[in-house]
Image (cartoon, helix red, strand yellow):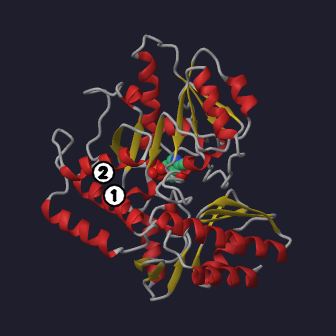
Amino acid sequence: MTQAITDQADQVIAATYERFPIVIERGQGCTLWDTTGKSYLDFVAGIAVCNLGHAHPRIAQAIADQAQRLCHVSNLYYTIPQIELASLLVEKSFADRVFFSNSGAEANESAIKLARKYFQDQGQNDRFQIIAMEQSFHGRTMAALSATGQAKIKKGFSPVLEGFEFVPFNDVSALEAAITSSTAAVLLEPIQGEGGIRCPMPDYLMRVRRLCDERDILLIFDEVQTGIGRTGKLFAHEHYGVQPDIMTLAKALANGLPIGAMLAREEVARSFGPGSHATTFGGSPLVSTAAVQVLKIIEEEKLLSYCFQTGAYFKEQLLWLQKRHTQIRDVRGEGLLLGMKLNSDVGNLVNLCLTKGFLVNGIQDSILRFVPPLIIGNEEIDALISTLDTIL
Ligand SMILES: *Cc1c(COP(=O)(O)O)cnc(C)c1O
């Protein structure tokens, strides 16, 4: 039966993903069930999206209630959930204003557009260049992929957009050397996600901030993956005592409903006036309602400190595994954004985990990425660790 479903899928769905041969039907907390009734512990969470787990009762109820009142009207009109969500984001961040969209790529598109417009509004039309990082990932739309520092993402889509330069992550001197009179912004993920869970050196972000201040350059943090509690802080940059001028969010903001957000300081945000940028769906009442619940639940259930503790426990267990298995080269990450680098391809390991009822994610060929719901428990972590121990 599974075979019949996947055969049909493979005929009618664009083949952009090489999918695992299971059909997932429902979820509850950190557990998923496929159409054969087999269960899986979910250490992927829809790639750092379902931070509060699957079918969260309060979020499900809020979505159901809102769906019966109003799903969408257009941003020509005010709606309460969008105002409530923007207010919460402003209250909890460095930012003064929020522009809502539907995805991480779109949030980054709007950040790139805002950075250019900020300088063009001041008559500095030649300040259009964005310096981004090697190994970065900012999404698949044309500008977002142009800003992405991985050749494999751009392959076949040339010419990509002009105005993007790349320097190695964690290298302040290279960044300084790349700055020219046309530099508008520096764009980076505080912790590189898709690029392999690469963390900044302790003073790196601080030094980048200082450099941007000295040269009057905007600093954009892409917190699409690191945001909304994933690292044990609401936004990862809080670990490093540094604030950006613009920040993008998406993945976990509405726990699985499609959303993107671009947050900015007033002085910068002002450059988006009526007609300068727009979206049909962004910030709809339905999606915003879910996101409001996400932010409230994270606070009420003290999930940031919980994630911090659970992440520390998980990392300790991975380090224990590393001591036992020489093929593990590195364990890294912050909170529940963890990576384990092996000295060979992890494809087979991921498949074996799946067979044993664990969803884990392989990236950059040799790295396992663990991004479970933030509500994961130590027993569930123990179960994965002992399975990995057995497989290795
Ligand atoms: C996933 C991701 C994106 C792209 O988000 P989409 O919603 O897939 O467009 C952008 N930046 C980072 C850091 C991401 O992890």
Q: Is residue 193 rendered to the left or right of residue 55?
A: right
Q: Nearer the viewer, residue 44 or 234?
A: 234
Quadrant housing residue 216: top right
Q: CA distance from mark 2 to mark 1?
A: 7 Å
Q: Are marks 2 and 1 in contact (CB under 8 Å)?
A: yes
The image position of residue 268, as x and y in percent, is 41, 27
Residue 1 % position (x, y)? 44, 85
Which of the two discs, 2 and 1, labels the residue nearer the N terminus? 2
Seen in the picture, residue 376 relative to 125 is either above or below; the reply is: below
Which residue is label 2 attached to? 85
Q: Residues within 10 Å of mark 1 (few under 14, many from 20)?
A: many
* Residue at 53% from the left image edge and 39% from the top image edge: 243
Q: Residue furthest left?
A: 69
| 286 vs 374, nearest the viewer | 374
Amino acid at pointer 2: Leu
Q: Residue at x 54, y 53 (%)?
A: 226
Q: Residue 339's spot in the image, x, y percent?
A: 67, 62
Look at the picture and state if 29 lies above or below 126: below
| Secondary structure at numbered mark 1 | helix
- The residue tagged 1 is 291
> Quick one: SS at disc 2?
helix
Q: Is residue 42 left or right of residue 121?
A: right
What type is the residue that disc 1 sits on? Ala
The quarter holding residue 122 reads: top left
Quarter of the figure with the C terminus: bottom right
Q: Is residue 19 visible?
A: no
